[in-house]
Image (spheres, grey):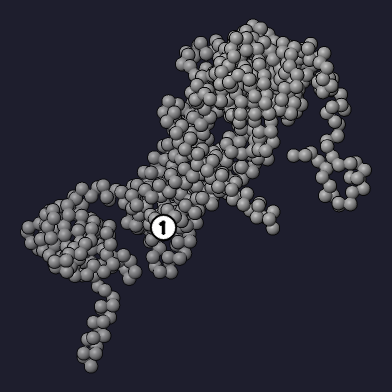
Amino acid sequence: MIDFLQRFGRTWIDMVGRLGRATLFLLHMLGALGSLFARPSLLVKQLYASGVMTLSIVLVSGLFVGMVLALQAYNTLIDFGQENRVGTLVALTLVRELGPVVTGLLFAGRAGSAMTAEIGLMKATEQLSGLEMMAVDPYKRVFAPRFLAGFLALPMLAAMFSAIGVIGGHLIGVDVLGVDASAYWSQMQNATSFYSDVGNGLIKGLVFGFVVSWIAIFEGADCIPTSEGVSSATTRTVVYSSLAILGLDFLLTAVMF
Amino acid sequence: MSSPDKMSDDGTTLVQIRDLHFSRGSKPIFSGLNIDIPRGKVTTIIGPSGTGKTTLLKMIGGQLKASQGSIHVDGLQVGKLRRAELYELRKRMGMLFQSGALLTDLSVFENVAYPLREHTDLPESLISHLVLMRLHAVGLRGARNLSPSELSGGMARRAALARALVFDPMMIMYDEPFTGQDPISMGVLLELIKTVNEALGLTSLMVSHDLKEALSISDYAVIISEGVVVEAGSPEQLESSESAWVQQFLHGQPDGPVPFQVSAPDYEEDLMGTENGNSRVGVSR
Amino acid sequence: MNSRAIDVLVGVFMLLFFGAMFILAMKVSNLTSLTSSAGYTLVAKFENVGGLKARASVAASGVKVGEVSAISYDPETFEASVTLTIDETFSDTFPTDTTASIYTAGLLGEQYIGLDPGAEIDMLQDSDEITLTQSAIVLERLIGQVLFSRSGGS
């Protein structure tokens, strides 16, 4: 019993300690962001690694999600004779919720896990120590570019997800099911506001990008430098990021809409 | 002992370690370590595995902080430097990691050029010259376009040596440079360490447990065990040491002052033990 | 992968993002109608606006000519004051005796304002008021009236 309590208490202390370390790490990393002005090429390289490499999976998923949404919306709305509103349902669902959330989950699985694994391996192979001994600050050269790239790439990918999803909805709703094309677009435009819907969707994307990149980079830098440690850190990145995205999405939706 | 903040600098000592204490968790690594590393010589720190030799190098490089005691490098106390000062000091130190620690996403050439690109604004042609000179010195000029994953372990260490040398440091630290090397690449590395030290007039500090090889090129050697210095002196002095422990260590005898058996309860008792697998065999933590 | 190829691909990535934002702004949301509404405003007062909302469309003969930009309650007249933004292309189009009515598109559709032009020669100008209005038909009220007239008749 005492043993159990001890272990329980230690787990909690460890967790709080990790949170503290993660916060200090974040502050240190944010402080290093300024150095990117001198080296924009580092950012471009990381935008490639986190943005371009995630692009294909985001576009394909977005297309199919839009198609499924149109199909479901049509089948429900036709009973009320409101099938013209398929566009509204597809666009609002995508722009407000599914765009940022699904993109965030895909991003955590594709780019976030890769970030953790890469940084974890750099730690395990002493590359991070090597940089420090070359008088190069890994926060400036390794962590900050990845963080900023993830922070920016996620909302951009979310916008692409929503846009291609709306096109997928058009493919199914208009071209296959026969909703009037101009009704599809005009109903959508009437219901969707650029600032409060598209804008808030982008803000969600920025928040998710911030959190996922933070978790991914911290887990990589904080991992136990063995192959086992790197693999469990990668798993933690995906699990924690996904939970954080879903929880934050609820909070943000409650505040925004 | 004199005040740990001051270094008694007579110019012949580059690194001075005084009363160094460090522990990882509750396990003490160093308990009162005193070492003087002479300028311009090859010094080897040897000791059994797990005595914290790599930790010591990291502390000299300022990556870990001592819990007590001081480390002076070239007159500067490493633990008390501000970040910028520490980085300035590190530019004058090179370190060769066990794995080489080359950046995996850059070619060999770019790896060697990396410190120059980070810290200077030299024109491309000059960087290219400097890099090729260093690569030539370690015999890897032909491998400049390979990526680190295409190099053998010995080549990776040579490339890392070229990188450590590119800034003309005053001292180079080698972390287990011979581990896992075949005889040929070991010979190459030995030769390189020696010639680099002589030709560039720098100070070399090596930690190793490959005794024979390390001692063959060392001017000075320090044996540490259980957190303190056991013996220090030239290789010849160590050879004639009267300590039974040193003799056992140098000649690799399986039993002696360091027992073959990890401390364990009585063998007979253990075999007949009625505690049903709950006996306390194993390394004491 | 050399750095030039990375630059190009990241450039393509940025272009795709701008394309996506263009679709979201111009096709999906109403940024177009908002920005191109360099039109003029009219005010109409209704006894009851029903379920009319801001951004509902304003149509004449079924053709969209503008949208509702604001709805507020006027405490002096105890009426709803609806601000309409009419597209610039329709300036000097509606006579001063134009009637504004609130209609419902279909049985369940959303409500919109229909403009029925009158016969006056003078045309409505910016920030003029449409005086002839017809309120939304509220279903409960309609049923109430029918029931009242039934019981009154018998």
Q: Residue at x 56, y 18 (%)?
A: B6
Q: Is residue A32 above or below residue B34?
A: below
Q: Is residue B230 visible?
A: yes
Q: Nearer the viewer, residue C146 or A25?
A: A25
Residue identified by numbered label 1 = A254
Q: Quadrant of residue B23?
A: top right
Q: Is residue B95 visible?
A: no
User: Does residue C42 appear to the left or right of A40 in the view shown?
Assistant: left
Q: Is residue C55 above or below residue B133?
A: below
Image x and y of residue A94, in percent? 44, 53
Q: Secondary structure at mark 1?
A: helix
**Which residue occupies the extreme left position in the image?**
C121
Q: Residue at x 67, y 10 (%)?
A: B41
Q: Nearer the viewer, residue B114 or B215?
A: B215
User: Does residue B193 appear to the left or right of A168 in the view shown?
Assistant: right
Image x and y of residue B85, in percent? 50, 21
User: Does residue C137 appear to the left or right of B168 in the view shown?
Assistant: left
Amino acid type assigned to the residue bearing label 1 in the image: Ala
